[in-house]
Image: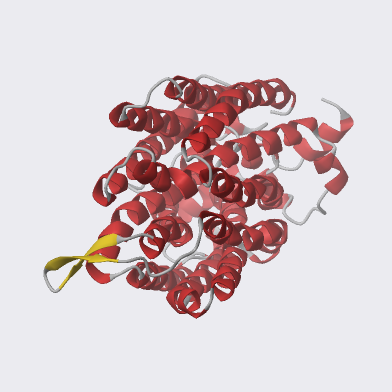
Amino acid sequence: MNSTEQKLHGIGGVENDKDVTQTCRCCLPLRYVIGIFLMFGFTNVYAMRVNLSVALAVMVGNQTLMKGGMEIEEPAEFSWGTKTQGFILSAFYFGYIVVHLPGGYLARKHGGATLLGLSVGATGILTLFTPLAAKTHVGVFIALRIAVGFAEGPVYPAGHAFWSKWAPPLERSKLATLNIAGGILGIIMSMFLSGYIAFHFGWSWIFYVFGSSGLIWSILCLCLVSNSPSQQRWMSREEAEYIQFSLAGDLQSQDVPIPWKAIFTSLPFWAIIVTHSTHSFGYYMLISELPLFYTQRLHLDLKQTWTASSLPYVVTLMMLILGGQIADYLRKHHLATGTVRKIFNTIGFLSEAISFLVLGYFSNATTVAVLITIGVGLGGLARSGFYVNHLDIASPLASVLLGITNTAASSAGILAPIVTGLIVQHHVSLVFKIVHLISRRGGFECSFCFSIFISKFV
C-alpha cells in the first residue's frame, strides 16, 4: 500500500472488523426499523424519477383508457418526436449530476437524515407540478425535470452519510444495500402502478400520487429520524453503545479535513468510479428505454409491458437483499472484506454480461424477457461489491466518495436516453444491440478492473 492509499485508508476502513462481535439482543434493533423506513424513502425517490418513462408512453401514444366504466381509445395528447422524448428523459440528469458532490459534503457536515428528508420533500413538491409544466410548454417541462433532478441529487450521498454513523462494519452490506433495494422497489411500483393509474385515472395522476407519497414520507423522516444514534429517540442504551463502540475509530475521524489529493490519486478509488459508471450506463438505458423496446420491438400491449418491465427489478430486489445478507455473513465468519466485495462484484457483472451476450441470438419475446430478467436481476449482486465499498475504505468520507462516483455514473443518465432516442429514429432494435455490446464488454472489463485494483485497498 503506497502513501496515498495509506492516507485515505487510515480514515475509517475495516481493519477492526473482526474485533466487533457483540450483537444486540433486541428482536429487531431500531437501526433495522429505521433502515426499512429509509428504504421506503428511496422507493419514493426512484418512483418519482422513473414514472415518467411509463407516463411518457401514454402522453405521446394512442392509448386505451378506462373512462366511465368503458374502455375508450384516446389519441396522443402530445406530438413530441423520439429526439424530444430523449431530451425530456435526460433532463432529470442535468440537474441530478451537479449536486452529488456538494450533497455529499453537506450530508457529512449537517447530517444524512436531515438532507435526505429535505431532498425527498422538494422532489415530491416539484413532481406534483409536473402535469402543469407538461401542458404549459415542452421547455417548461424540461426545466422542471432538471429541477427535479437537482432536488433529488443529494439523496444517495445522504444515505451513505447516514449509514456511516449508523451501520456497524459487519452490517454494512445488508444496511447500505437497503437504500438500493428501496430504489429497485420504486422502479417496480412505478412500472406496475403508473400503468394502472394512467389506465383508470389518466397520466397526470401518476405524478400526483407519487409526489404526494414522497412529500408525506419526507415529513415523517424529518420528524422521526435523527442524524446519529446518540440523538435518536426510542433507541435502547445497549444498541446505542454497540453502534458507538463498533464505529469508535470512524466517529473520531468525522471532522478530519477531506484529503482531496489522496482521493483523486488513488487507483483503487478510480476503479470504483469506472465500475460504478459502466454499471450505470446500461442500467439507465434499461430504465429509460425498456418499456419502449417491449412495445415497439416486441409488440407487447400496455399490461404485458408493465409485467415484463417490472420482472428484472423484482429479481434485482431479491438479489440485493439476499446478497447483502450473504456478504455480511461471509465477512463475519469466513472471508476478508476485500475478497467478499470482489466476489460479489464479479458475479454481478459477469452474470449481466453473459445474459446480454446470449440475448443477441434470440428474437422470441418470452426468451428475450427471461434473459433480460436474469441478467439485470443477478447484476444486482454487484451492489454488494462496488456500491458498499465507499463505506469500507473511508466510512467518515463515504458521502463525499459516493458523491464523486455518482457524479461520474450519472453522466450515463444524460447520455443514455439521448443516444437511444437518436437511434430509435432509425431502428429500435439497435438500442438493445448497443446495450448488449456495452454490457458484454463492460461487464468483463469492469469485473477485471475492480478485482485487480481494489485488492490494494481493502
| Count of picture labels | 0
Q: Is residue 23 above or below residue 326?
A: below
Image coordinates of residue 348 in percent, x first then y, are 50, 27
Asked whether residue 22 is in view, the answer is: no
In-front residue for pair 49/342? 49
- Single out the residue that lies furthest toward the front: 426
Q: Residue 266's quadrant in the figure?
A: top right
In-front residue for pair 179/300? 300
Give the side of residue 29 with respect to residue 109, left or right: left
Image coordinates of residue 273 in percent, x first then y, are 70, 38
Q: Is residue 228 above or below residue 164?
A: below
Colour convention: secondary structure
Residue at 43 percent of width and 24 percent of height? 359
Image coordinates of residue 95 in percent, x first then y, are 64, 63
In-front residue for pair 245/188? 188
Residue at 34 percent of width and 37 percent of height? 298
Q: Where, quadrant-wise, is the N terminus in this rendering? A: top right
Asked whether residue 89 is in view, the answer is: yes
Image coordinates of residue 331 in percent, x first then y, are 53, 27
Q: Where, quadrant-wise, is the C terminus in this rendering? A: top right
Q: Is residue 280 above or below residue 121?
A: above
In-front residue for pair 117/123? 123
Q: Is residue 56 above or below residue 239?
A: below
Residue at 31 percent of width and 46 percent of height? 305
Give the side of residue 89 with respect to residue 26, left or right: right
